[in-house]
Every structure is written in C-alpha cells, then in structure tokens.
Image: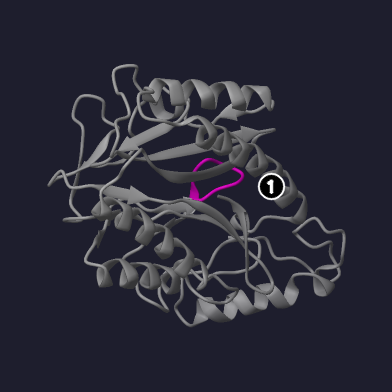
Amino acid sequence: MAVKIGRNDPCWCGSGKKYKKCHEAFDDKIAYYRGQGHIVPDRSLIKTPAQIEKIKQSCAVNIAVLDAVAAQIHAGMTTQEIDDIVAAKTAEMGAIPAPLHYEGYPKSVCTSINEVVCHGIPSDKVVLKDGDIINVDVSTILDSYFSDSSRMFCIGEVSPEKKKLVDVVKECVYLGLEQVKPWGFLGDMGQAINDHATANGYEVVREIGGHGVGLAFHEDPWVSYVSKAGEEMLLVPGMIFTIEPMINMGSHKVTVDKEDNWTVTTVDKKPSAQWEIMVLVTETGHEVLCY
C-alpha cells in the first residue's frame, strides 16, 4: 500500500514539486476508479520522466539490433547466425541481451519459425528456407533499463496464406495501439486485437501475453489479447507495456517442448505469427518506444 503523502510534501514521482501541485489529482482519479471496482496500477508501474528517458535509450539499442538483423536475414543462414548478429550488435552498443541466461534461457534472442509460436532457441542446425516466416524477438538491458520488441520476416517467396497471417498480425497490433489512451483499459486494446484476428479467421493465443517492462524484463500488468473492452487494468500516463499478440492460422492451442522447456509450438502445427511493440501511455494518448 502506498504511503500517505501530505499535500505540501514532495511528490512521490521525484519531480521536486509539492504533492498537491503534482500527482494529488492524479492519485485521486485512480482512487475513484479503484472505488468503482476496476483494477488499477500501483505507483511502481508508473515511470517517472527520468526513468522514461533511460528506457528510451535502451529502446534505441533494441531497434538498432533489429535493424541489423533485418539488413542481413536471408534464406540459407542459420538461426545461430541471427543470434550472433544480435550478440555482436548489442555488445557494440554497450548493452546486454536480456534473454541470455534469463531463467536458464541459453541464447541472446528468440527465433520462432512457422509453427513455433515463441521462444524458439537459435541453433546452428536450424537453417532458414525459402517460404519460411520467422519472428525475431530482441530484448535489451542498457544501464539496468529494459526494452523489448520483435518483428516478423518473410524469407524468399512466402505463400499468400502465410503473408496474409503476417500482415494481419501487424494490423492487429496497430488497431490495438489505437485503443491505448489514458483512463481507458487494457481490455479496450485486447478486444480490438481479438476482433480483427477472428474476423480474418485466426485464433489468438491465450496463455501467453504481453507485459509491463522498463525497470525489469517482465513487470505487471500481464497483457491479454482475448480480453473485453472496459475490463483489465486501468491505463494511466507513465505506464509502459508490450503489445505482442501471437496469432495462429489454426487453433489457439499451443504446447511447450518437453526437452528444452522453452519452445512453444501450435498443437496443430499450423503457422503462427507475432509482432511486438513497446508503448508508453501519455497524457494525451500513447507513444511507441520500441518496434
């Protein structure tokens, strides 16, 4: 529970202003929504301007790393070569790959091909082929601040069915983004994403979602993409989280590899696709920090 602050005390956000001139009205508004029975963020989820600036610097590295992958990815390369690009570019920019050794994960990036939904582990035995679709998920630590985003890549001549899946997933992300605004709800975004996916005949993965990020790799809130408008956590300025729906061409059902305990695949082996961006809720709407 947040410590009670006097109106003339310094504000909890570190601005140096008196509480009554800074976040008192903001906190009162959150308290109103809490009283209406809504899920609301605590102060630990609301980033200060100084923290946001440092997180943006981490995001700049993350974007540069994905750009480096985009410039070099091609049929015939191994997913280990992608990992090598990520590791080298991240180190060159003075940062650390967040996935490396995270809960035992052995590589610097996740490379998820075709029916692999997420957490595909790079390997020198996995070679990209013409017609593959792949998600490259990059996460970065710079000066103890975290960033996270992923992109889909179509390798060579991809079937119209796979190309449509990749395109629709990106459309879902940006339709969801349109719903990110202060004093709305995470469910507004989740419903927009789910509605567009299902209208195109796809199913959204339920067990795996987005997350808060910035001061840690994974923070609250957990972000669902099968939620309903007006539900889930209240969105307030200063919150940062990922929008990263995983959308399947077939059933939403997934399974985790029993040997590596990381690789998630579709149960029916039909393709899956994902885009991930990192977004800040602002006073007037939102800002995409990482893509």
Residue 164 picture location, percent across and down:
31, 58
Residue 57 picture location, percent across and down:
71, 42
Q: How many marks?
A: 1
Q: Residues within 10 Å of mark 1 (few under 14, many from 20)?
A: some
Segment colored magenta = 212-219
Residue 193 picture location, percent across and down:
38, 67
Above or below — where is 231 with respect to 106? below
Kind of residue indicated by mark 1: Lys
**Extreme residue toward the left, this view:** 268
Magenta-span inclusion, residue 146: no
Residue 132 picture location, percent across and down:
29, 38
Element under disc 1: helix
**Extreme residue toward the top, this view:** 124
Q: Residue 25's image quarter? A: bottom right
Of residues 129 and 181, the one nearer the viewer is: 129
Above or below — where is 132 with respect to 188? above
Residue plotted at (27% across, 48% down) = 272
Q: Residue 203's image quarter? A: bottom left
Q: Is residue 135 left or right of residue 143?
A: left
Residue named by callout 1: 56
Q: Is residue 285 visible?
A: yes
Magenta-span inclusion, residue 214: yes
Q: Quadrant of the image for the N terminus? A: bottom right
Q: Is residue 22 left or right of residue 76?
A: right
Q: How is the image coloured?
A: one colour
Above or below — where is 66 with respect to 170? above
Above or below — where is 17 with respect to 214? below
The secondary structure that most of the magenta stretch takes on is: loop
Q: Is residue 224 visible?
A: no
